[in-house]
Amino acid sequence: MQKNVLLINLGSPKSLNIKDIRAYLFEFLSDKFVVDLPKLLQQFIVRLIILPFRSRKTRNAYKAIWSSKGSPLIENTKIIAHSLKQKTGWNVDIAMRYQNPSIKDSILSFKKRKVKEIVIVPLYPHHAMSTTYSTKVEVDRIIKQYYPELRYSIIKPFYDHPKYIHALSEQLKPFISNQMDKVIFSYHGLPERHMRKSDASGEHCLQSSFCCEIDCEPARKCYRSNVLKTSELVAEKLNLNKEQWVASFQSRVTIIDRKWLRPFTDIVLKNLPKKRVNNIVIICPSFIADCLETLEEIDIRARELFYKAGGKTFDYAPCLNNDKNFIGLLEQLISEI
């Protein structure tokens, strides 16, 4: 059966021009589900504190990974869409939550082509207020405003789906050896308050040291619980014991709130050689497509940090991108709608 699919990823600046960098950061950080503060306070922090100091730093980071085709995130998302289209024959479009190609333009394109029904795939494996929920709210708003007749389904997070776990395990296998001391599962960091806000019961998330070990509705919709579950399932599939892996969190911004999910990836990497853990492989399961946070923050800066701390071997396992196992997962998830 022919399907029309929209893959949605986070977004990227249009170019390395400082104005484009600022435009992207401004839209991203103005999302009330990302910087979840009263609007006036949010805008004061974004406009007067973050943008003046972070824009050039962000541009320098992008410079290290920018290709002749532009943003790696957008290019890799296009490749995922092409691979899915090649495998299934479906019509597959892409959009970004922030900047271009925009969700609005994609929906208007479906309207122009008189498409009556679509399947939307947010490329985020784990539940999070700042990704899956923000994307759903924006999709609902745009479709209601510009194409209310459009029928649509949104794929749910797939953090524990057997095919996702299999794909990650296969991605890691080439790096697993007798010389490897530890696998680092590095996830995008979030403020602890996001976990609490996502807990509709208000009585579970971060209320105890073992909250993520309890199988319940709040845990199933909790980012921290989701990422730990992903790590545990992959470790189990690869027969790793508890001493051979650790889950950590990267990309924190502590200007607003210092209480972010721990442990921090950079601190973990700095301390491992002191414990005679010198040979590691690191993978970033919360990112489907390689991007700034994986290619620059991890494969460049985290690598340098680990070696500077005395580490010997640092292997980076790429994101799934258009891996055949991941494309197979997308095909199954969409077919089941």
Image (spheres, rainbow, N blue to C red):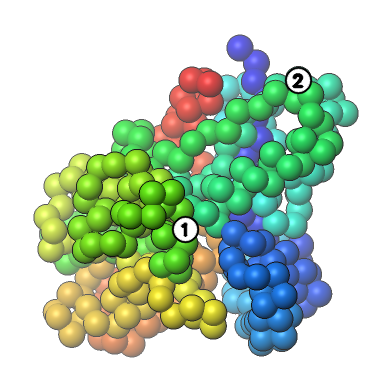
Q: Which of 72 and 21 is in front in this view?
A: 21
Residue appearing at x 66%, y 57% in the figure: 11
Residue 245 visible from this viewpoint: yes
The residue at which mark 2 appears reads as: 116
CA gap, disc 1 to disc 2?
35 Å
Q: Is mark 2 on a helix, strand or loop?
A: loop
**Would residue 198 appear left or right of 34 to someone viewing this image?**
left
Residue appearing at x 54%, y 79% in the figure: 256
Q: What residue type is labelled 1?
A: Lys
The residue sitting at the right extreme is: 112
Residue 55 visible from this viewpoint: no
Q: What residue type is labelled 2?
A: Lys
Q: Quadrant of residue 105?
A: top right
User: Eyeballing the image, is 135 above or below 72?
Assistant: above
Q: Is mark 1 on a helix, strand or loop?
A: helix
Residue appearing at x 44%, y 31% in the figure: 329
The residue at which mark 1 appears reads as: 197
